[in-house]
Amino acid sequence: MSEVRNDGMSTSEVRRPSHHPAGMAIGLAVGLVLGLLVNLLSKNRDTFWLAPFFGWLTPGRIEWVTGHVVEPIGKVFLRLILCVVLPLVFSALVLAVVELKDIRKLGALGLRAIGFTLLFSACSVMIGLGLVHVFGPGYAISEQTRAEIQSHYRISERDGRPSSKSLSQVLLDLIPENPLQEAVGALDGSAKGNGMLALMVFALLVGCATVNVGSRTDGFVGVLEGLFAISMKIVDWAMRIAPLGVGCLMFAAMARLGMDLVVPLFGFLAVALAGLAVQTLGVYPAALRLCGIRPGRFFGAIRHVMLTAFGTSSSNATLPTALRAAEEDLGLSPQIARFVLTVGATGNQNGTALYEGVVILFLCQVFGVHLTLLQQASVMVFAILAGVGTAGVPAGSIPMIMAILAGIGVPPEGIGLILGFDRFLDMCRTVVNVTGDLTIAQCLDAWHKKQQTR
C-alpha cells in the first residue's frame, strides 16, 4: 500500500492510467448511436427512413449478431473484472486495516481521523441514496422494458425480496461460520449467511489480528500485497479493452431497449453528479467552518490539486501534489498531512462511497429489486467498507460495486448498463475523494493547533 518517501512521493504505483477517458467516451457514443439505429430499424421497418438501405438486417439477424457476437465481446471485459472481485476485496480490506497500524502513534489525532472518515463516508452515502430515492432515475423505464431486462439477465421476482431472517440473525451472520463457503456463494447468491458482507467483516477481523500479531505476519502481508497487485493488474488489462467492451455492452442494451433506456441513464448521470456536488460544496465547507477555516481560502489553495485529481482519476497519482499543497499552500503540519493524505488515498474515498451507493440503488430500481430499510442499511455499510477498500486508481471501484450487487440479488453483469459513464464519473469522484482527504487534514491540523495553544 502507499507510503511517503523522503522526497514526498508515494511508493504506490503513481502513473497516469493506461486507458484514456476519450476512449471510453467514444465507445459509449458509438455503441449508443449504433444501438439506437439498429433498434429503430428493427422495430420501425415500415416508417424508419433508413430501412430500405438495410433490408438485409432483419430482426432475427440483429438479435443473433447482438446475442452471439457483440454482447459476448462486452462480457469478456466484465468477466475479467468479475474473476478478481473476491481476491481483490479480501486483500484490499485486510491491507487497509494493516495500513492503519501506525494510527496508535498519533493517539487522539488518529482516532479523530477515523471519526472524520466514517462521518464523511456516511454523509456521502446517505446523500447518494437520498437523491436516488427522491428522483428515482431507475423508475423512468417502462414495465415492459424492465421485464425485458429481468428476462435477459434471468432475474426472477423472488430475487431481491426481503430476507425472512430476523435482525438478530442478520447481525449474527455478519460473522461467517465458514468464510470459504461465504466467498464461494458471494457472487451467485448461494451463500449461507451474508455472503459478501460476511466476507468483508472476516477480512476486517483478519486485518485487525494481523496488526496485533506483529512482525510474524510480514510474510502474510507480503502475499496479500502481491495478490492485490495481481488483481489490480488484471483490472488494468480489462480497462485496456474497456472502450471496446463498453461500446459492445451499450450497443447490445440500446439495440434491445432503444430510447426506453436513454432517459434513465442520463437521469443516473445527473443524480450522481448532483450528489458529488452536494458533498463537495455542502458537507466539506460546513466541516471547515465548524473548525474555524474559511472554505474560500481552502478551495483556492487546493484548486490545482483538484484539477490533477480530475485529470488522473487516481488518488494515488494525485498524492504528491496533495502533499505539496497541504504543507506549502495550506501550511499544515507535515506529520498530520502525510499521515492523513497517505492513508486517505485508499482509506477515505467519500466520492467513491457515494457513487457506489447511487449505482447500487439505481440498478435495483432498474431491475425491480425492492430493498427493505434493513437491506438499504446493509447497502450503506457495504458502500462505506467498499470506499475504504477501493484502490485509489482509475476503475478501482468497479470490482467493489459488482461484489455489492451480487450480495443483494442484482446480477453483477448489470453494471454494464452504466459503465459508459463510469470514466467521466471516476474523474469527478476522484476530485471529491482528494478534497475529502485534504478537508480532514485541515480540520485535524486546526484542532491540533488549538490543543497546543491551551
Image (spheres, rainbow, N blue to C red):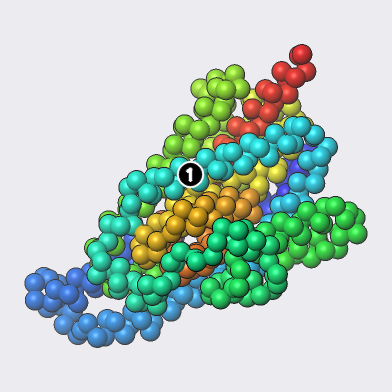
Q: Is residue 300 above or below residue 275?
A: above
Q: What SS does tag 1 mark?
A: helix
Who's the residue at 36% across and 77% down the image?
A: 152
Question: In the rendered view, does 133 fall on the left or right side of 47?
Answer: right
Residue behind mark 1: 126
The answer to whether 316 appears left or right of 334 in the picture is left
The spot of residue 276 in percent (x, y) is: 46, 42
Q: 429 above or below 360?
A: above
Q: Residue at x 88, y 54 (%)?
A: 214
Horizontal and vertical percent for residue 395? Answer: 54, 57
**Amino acid type of the residue tagged 1 in the rendering:** Met
Give the number of marks: 1
- Residue 453 x, y percent position in the rendering: 76, 14
Residue at the left extreme, as displayed: 47
Instruction: Write the residue at 52% across / 40% down.
Output: 123
Q: Nearer the viewer, residue 318 or 260?
A: 260
Give the residue furthest to the right: 216
Q: Say above or below: 403 vs 435.
A: below
Query: Where, quadrant-wise, is the C terminus in this rendering?
Result: top right
Q: Residue at x 36, y 64 (%)?
A: 368
Label 1, residues with CA under 10 Å away: few <14, some 14-19, many ≥20: some
Front residue of 13/83: it is 83
Quarter of the image holding residue 140? bottom left
Look at the image and tell me whether residue 297 can be seen. Answer: no
